[in-house]
């Protein structure tokens, strides 16, 4: 005997203002199957929920309809409520009489009539609800962090400290990311490498962390708790076990003038190289495209001088497949390429550089040993102009968004110019000055007041060269909006605060691992406000600039948050999955397989069914059996979209929680 | 290749040299320019101020007339060009606008024949054709190519060239044997009518362009627009006086330089009409004297040509009469 | 070829056959009502329809986008006709064309199937199937003579509250002059 309880909420006056709740509750009593109906001011409140639980007990209700706000608000709340009232949590339906009734209509009679219809629908549906059992999937207790910058390192450390094992995959030869290239960090002016390297060392020495350097994620199969990840370990041609990191090979390598990626092409490196002195792991790799031996067949000097016999020219890429319970994506960012900016010279002016290039110049272990020098002629610049928002907040040439860290690092750069170069001028062209973090505003003001940095409000329309030969100089043509005048500045060097962009292969990578990305190719978080480190793909989390432009403090915080989510997942032996999944009626399934390609999660596959032939009485060799193929749904993979159900020609596939019968009942109930 | 030539209002007035030189040079490269019969004003900036639809309909009328003859318009003046291309773009992108324009001009207009600038028609004819016909390469002449604002902007429909660093005129200049200099003010505004109406605003704009051209080491400036040339040429003397040092930067139409390289008479190129006379410069660079080509009659093709009477070394091209088509 | 699968829902398709309308007033009561069918079966005239008749529209709304968009319309207090009924499905790909036919059979005057914009489906590919299925379905309905203006497929995202209001209002306004839907209406009643 099905007994429905209907509970109408006033939601204060939100609903009751436009919908006659008492009348609604009264009318609900007349509906077939309804054993009890009432109304209350705040159904979601403690007393409201108690009312529901008591009614269940008192009237022997076996299913509940709540007519209140949107199920997107409180479906979970009421599910938990009836669960603690002794019912299966899926014996609940919600009639949305607030967002989709009282708030969008004004005529009280018509709105009440509509609310009645909505309650009808919910009752008709709930009468066909079934008790849905949750299923459990095992959770493999190992985490993967993709990306070895500060975000990845921090996430790995936080997960490893709780006792779970973490693999940290990085595609460069060393971990460290962009933070290793930076000189000083705002607002404290800590040396970046000095605060980063201890963390890098911690990560390399942590018993629970395995660093997998010079490798990339090739494929991700599986699902939350059970990701089967294929990692390509790129051929480095150096045996990292034998190698001692002595560096003799790099010293003796004859191909020394290769532009160094780490130095932003302002410096050089040899073909067998470690990107920077504090690299971890400190084992060199051979750049095959520039190696003399690979190009000409002659050389092998590195192999000859190596005392550990670690060089191996026969090395090949290796694919490894490992299972993980959770994945953290921390792939970081790249910078907007200003060589597409015609107004600033298409990248042809050597002394017009990006902020990261400036970091390398000013870094004591950089290509100029920390002396700020013009790339064109190696002289010290006196007038340095900084331009902010290059490629950010720029609909015409770049992106709409703000890159968040540039105002601070430009203030930092300008302060360093004033500090390091005698009689210098630092002029910053800005649209706004955004200093939201702790001590950020004070940092910027110090630059202005103590270091004499000049801020000019206006955009720079052009940078051009004037004169020829030795007399050539850069002119920055901009505007001072506060004075209402055009401004022409003679510049020795121009530093552009270029926009932070996701890695160039971000979109392809997201598709590979199954997460979504937004129109700027940053990876999408599940909810911008309340779920900033999760993705809509269960088990995959985000940390750092791959999710959106941010500075180091925010990155570290986000990495810790992602780690917490990972640990929450890994701490369970089993994970409960939502039972709203597709179900195959094997009696009707003909094994046509039409449903299989529909599923984006590859949740449907064939399975064999052995049945007795009609008429035979026994199993086994004495009876006759027939084997046939039917569709089978993996409950762990199925996300409950129901697209397959429509395709099924026999009507064998149905979606639990939104069955065909339920939906048709809803349609019918309105007439 | 035949085009409907649209001179516009300026080519018989301030742009007379442009007209003369273009008409002289085109046939040498196999281009036939037939003046569009019954052409009317394109509206330029005046119509644009009054009413947007009118501003598109006026140039569309001329393009429609050309279309009736099955010809593309060839337009020298940059403003006429810009308005005509705007009309073409509007017609191509909006059915509604096309209907409005067609009803205003009272004839159909499909924009099937793209309107082209004189620059484009020469590029379309082929730089090789040009190079083959050059008799007197302009060696040693350093030229600053000035495009002005309308040749490469707005990029919606003026998309033949890069808006920040256009190269079309430079390419032609290089093909003529001269040396295009790299300079920064290729597309800076010359002030349009401001040097006349508002000299305190327009003057500095022209001054900036001339100064940069000078600093880049150019001997002269080359333009493709009567307005630009007008401003750079007519205001130069006064601006030179103001700063206490003359500029001495003759301003040419690129078609005039083409004419010189193709060995046309300077008189035929309107060189005497400039305010800043280019004659001293051309003289200095030895580019004024025409090369006399002896007509070779009844002689087999491989007989060497006798040396000419001019002091210049002729380019060996025995079958080429003076300035004949390739 | 008329196609009501306009992703921006901006064009109103022309009907292939002018629909004939027979009066069929639908009383709006709280409890499920019997359909009162007038005995008058003569050809339509506007005054035969009840003066306060409004077209009843059923919206199959996908949980992640359209339903959220409708909720947003509610949060923003955007008003739309009271004769709209929303049926929640997890994905627009769940809506079986048979549900749509059922809706018309039962007496709905218009049906809207709405989901996430192509490329944004929460389940990645569900709305692509919706698109394909409903293209076929529209042709089928035209073939059987149902006015295609009564059926629409639309993409409404979770942030498009105003769009939800606009689409639903426009659909109601488009259907109002067409009168109550007759073509598929099964008067005898389909067994529930």
Image (cartoon, rainbow, N blue to C red):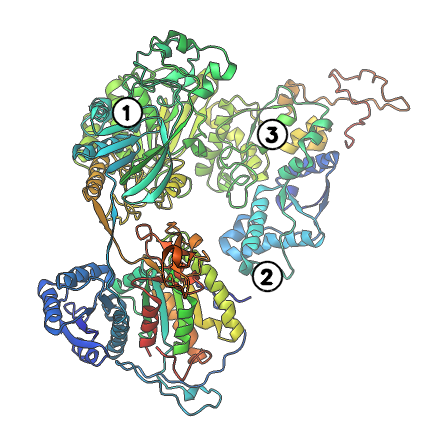
Q: Position of residue A67 (x, y in %)?
A: 21, 70
- For the point 48% across and 29% down, the residue is B184
- For the point 16% across and 75% down, the residue is A37
Residue at the limit of the structure toward the bottom, as seen here: C39
In this picture, residue A108 sits left or right of residue A247: left
Q: Position of residue A394 (x, y in %)?
A: 37, 41
Q: Quadrant of the N terminus of chain A?
A: bottom left
- Please state which of the two labelled residues, at mark 3 or mark 1, is closer to the viewer: 1
Q: Give the Cα separation between the discs numbered 3 and 1.
A: 46 Å
Q: Which image quarter: residue A208?
A: top left
Q: Give the Cα separation between the discs numbered 3 and 2.
A: 40 Å
Vertical placement of residue B301 versus A500, above or below: above
The tag on residue B171 is 3
Give yes or no for contact between labels 3 and 2 (Cβ–Cβ under 8 Å).
Answer: no
Residue carrying label 2: B104
Q: Quadrant of the C terminus of chain A?
A: bottom left
- Please state which of the two labelled residues, at mark 1 or mark 2, is closer to the viewer: 1
Query: Which element type, helix, strand or loop, lies under badge 1?
Result: helix
Residue carrying label 1: A180
Q: Is residue A434 visible in the rendered structure shown here?
A: yes
Vertical placement of residue B101 versus A331, above or below: below
Q: Position of residue C42 (x, y in %)?
A: 48, 90
Crowd tier of the residue under label 2, counting other residues whose Cα lies within 10 Å: few below 14, some 14–19, many 20 or above: some
Numbered circles on residues, count = 3
Both marks 1 and 2 on one chain = no
Chain letter of mark 3 equals: B
Q: Is residue C8 visible in the rendered structure shown here?
A: no
Vertical placement of residue B82 versus B126, above or below: below
Q: Which image quarter: residue A332?
A: top left
Give yes or no for contact between labels 1 and 2 (Cβ–Cβ under 8 Å).
Answer: no
């Amino acid at each position: 005997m099905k007994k429905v309880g209907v509970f109408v909420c006033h939601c204060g006056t939100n609903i009751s203002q436009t919908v006659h709740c008492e009348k609604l509750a009264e009318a609900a009593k007349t509906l077939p199957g309804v054993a009890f109906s009432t109304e209350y001011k705040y159904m979601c409140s403690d007393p409201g929920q108690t009312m529901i639980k008591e009614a269940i007990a008192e009237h022997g209700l076996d299913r509940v309809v709540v007519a209140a706000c949107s199920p997107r608000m409180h479906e979970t709340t009421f599910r938990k409520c009836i669960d603690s009232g002794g019912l299966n949590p899926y014996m609940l339906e919600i009639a949305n009489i607030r967002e989709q009734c009282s708030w969008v209509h004004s005529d009280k009679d018509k709105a009440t009539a509509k609310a009645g219809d909505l309650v009808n629908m919910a009752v008709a549906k709930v009468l066909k609800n079934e008790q849905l059992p949750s299923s459990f999937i095992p959770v493999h207790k190992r985490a993967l962090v993709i990306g070895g910058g500060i975000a990845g390192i921090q996430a790995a450390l936080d997960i490893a400290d709780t006792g779970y094992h973490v693999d940290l995959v990085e595609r460069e030869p060393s971990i460290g990311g962009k933070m290793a290239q930076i000189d000083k960090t705002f607002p404290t002016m800590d040396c970046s490498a000095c605060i980063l390297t201890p963390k890098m060392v911690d990560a390399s020495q942590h018993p629970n962390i395995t660093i997998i350097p010079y490798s990339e994620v090739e494929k991700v199969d599986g699902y939350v708790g059970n990701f089967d990840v294929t990692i390509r370990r790129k051929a480095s041609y150096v045996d990292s076990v034998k190698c001692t990191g002595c560096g003799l090979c790099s010293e003796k390598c004859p191909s020394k003038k290769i532009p160094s990626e780490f130095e932003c092409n302002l410096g050089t490196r040899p073909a067998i190289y470690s990107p920077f002195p504090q690299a971890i792991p400190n084992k060199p790799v051979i750049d095959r495209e520039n190696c003399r031996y690979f190009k000409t067949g002659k050389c092998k000097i590195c192999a000859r001088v190596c005392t550990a016999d670690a060089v191996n020219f026969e090395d090949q890429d290796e694919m490894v497949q490992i299972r993980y319970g959770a994945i953290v994506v921390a792939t970081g960012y790249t910078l907007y390429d200003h060589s597409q900016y015609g107004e600033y010279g298409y990248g042809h002016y050597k002394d017009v550089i990006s902020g990261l290039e400036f970091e390398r110049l000013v870094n004591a272990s950089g290509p100029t040993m920390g002396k700020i020098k013009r790339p064109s002629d190696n002289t010290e610049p006196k007038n340095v102009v900084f331009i902010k928002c290059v490629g950010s907040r720029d609909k015409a040439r770049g992106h709409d968004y703000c890159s968040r860290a540039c105002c601070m690092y430009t203030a930092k750069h300008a302060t360093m110019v004033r500090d390091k170069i005698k009689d210098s001028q630092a002029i910053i062209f800005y649209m706004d000055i955004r200093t939201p973090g702790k001590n950020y505003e004070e940092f910027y003001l110090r630059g202005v007041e103590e270091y004499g940095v000049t801020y000019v409000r206006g955009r720079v329309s052009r940078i051009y060269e004037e004169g020829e030969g030795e007399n050539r100089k850069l002119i920055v043509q901009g505007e001072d909006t506060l004075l209402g005048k055009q401004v022409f500045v003679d510049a020795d060097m121009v530093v552009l605060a270029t926009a932070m962009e996701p890695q160039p292969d971000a979109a392809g990578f997201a598709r590979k691992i199954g997460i979504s990305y937004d129109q700027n190719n940053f990876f999408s978080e599940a909810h911008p406000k309340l779920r900033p480190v999760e993705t809509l793909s269960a088990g995959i989390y985000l940390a750092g600039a791959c999710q959106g432009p941010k500075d180091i403090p925010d990155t570290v915080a986000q990495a810790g948050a992602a780690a917490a989510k990972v640990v929450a997942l890994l701490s369970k032996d089993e994970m409960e999955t939502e039972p709203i999944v597709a179900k195959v009626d094997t009696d009707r399934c003909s094994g046509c397989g039409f449903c299989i390609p529909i599923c984006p999660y590859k949740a449907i596959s064939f399975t064999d069914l052995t049945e007795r032939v009609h008429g035979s009485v026994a199993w086994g060799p004495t009876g006759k059996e027939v084997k046939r193929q039917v569709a089978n749904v993996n409950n762990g993979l199925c996300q409950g979209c129901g697209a397959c159900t429509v395709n099924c020609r026999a009507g064998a596939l149905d979606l639990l929680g939104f069955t065909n019968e339920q939906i048709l009942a809803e349609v019918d109930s309105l007439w | 290749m035949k085009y409907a030539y649209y001179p516009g209002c300026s080519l018989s007035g301030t742009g007379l040299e442009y007209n003369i030189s273009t008409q002289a040079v085109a046939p040498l490269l196999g281009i036939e320019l037939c003046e569009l019969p019954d052409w009317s004003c394109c509206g330029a900036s005046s119509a644009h101020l009054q009413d947007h639809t009118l501003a598109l309909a006026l140039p569309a009328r001329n393009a429609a007339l050309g279309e009736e003859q099955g010809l593309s318009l060839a337009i020298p003046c940059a403003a006429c060009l810009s308005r005509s291309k705007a009309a073409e773009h509007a017609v191509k992108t909006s059915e509604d606008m096309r209907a409005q324009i067609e009803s205003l001009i009272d004839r159909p207009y499909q924009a099937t024949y793209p309107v082209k600038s004189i620059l484009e028609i020469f590029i379309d004819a082929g730089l090789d054709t040009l190079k083959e016909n050059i008799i007197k390469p302009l060696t040693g002449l350093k030229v600053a190519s000035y495009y002005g604002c309308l040749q490469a902007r707005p990029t919606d429909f003026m998309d033949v060239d890069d808006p920040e660093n256009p190269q079309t005129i430079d390419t032609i200049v290089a093909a003529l044997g001269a040396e295009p200099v790299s300079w920064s003010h290729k597309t800076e505004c010359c002030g349009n009518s401001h040097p006349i109406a508002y000299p305190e605003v327009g003057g500095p704009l022209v001054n900036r362009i001339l100064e940069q051209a000078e600093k880049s080491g150019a001997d002269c400036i080359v333009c493709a627009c009567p307005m630009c040339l007008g401003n750079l040429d007519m205001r130069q003397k006064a601006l030179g006086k103001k700063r206490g040092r003359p500029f001495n930067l003759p301003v040419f139409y690129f078609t005039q330089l083409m004419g010189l390289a193709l060995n046309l008479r300077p008189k035929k190129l309107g060189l005497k009409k400039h305010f800043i006379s280019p004659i001293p410069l051309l003289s200095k660079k030895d580019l004024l004297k025409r090369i006399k080509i002896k007509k070779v009659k009844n002689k087999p093709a491989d007989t060497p040509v006798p040396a000419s009477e001019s002091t210049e070394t002729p380019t060996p091209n025995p079958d080429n009469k003076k300035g004949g088509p390739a | 070829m008329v196609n009501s699968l306009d992703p921006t829902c901006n064009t109103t398709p022309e009907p292939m056959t002018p629909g004939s309308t027979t009066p069929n007033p639908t009383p709006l009561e709280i409890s499920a009502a019997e359909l009162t069918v007038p005995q008058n079966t003569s050809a339509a005239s506007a005054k035969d329809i009840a003066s306060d008749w409004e077209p009843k529209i059923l919206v199959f709304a996908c949980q992640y986008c359209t339903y959220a968009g409708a909720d947003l319309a509610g949060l923003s207090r955007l008003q739309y006709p009271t004769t709209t009924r929303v049926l929640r499905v997890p994905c627009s790909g769940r809506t079986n064309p048979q549900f749509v036919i059922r809706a018309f059979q039962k007496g709905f005057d218009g049906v809207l199937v709405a989901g996430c914009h192509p490329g944004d489906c929460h389940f990645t590919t569900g709305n692509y199937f919706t698109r394909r299925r409903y293209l076929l379905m529209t042709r089928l309905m035209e073939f059987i003579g149902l006015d295609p203006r009564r059926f629409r497929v639309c993409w409404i995202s979770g942030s498009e509250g105003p769009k939800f209001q606009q689409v639903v209002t426009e659909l109601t306004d488009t259907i109002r002059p067409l009168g109550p839907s007759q073509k598929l209406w099964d008067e005898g009643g389909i067994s529930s």
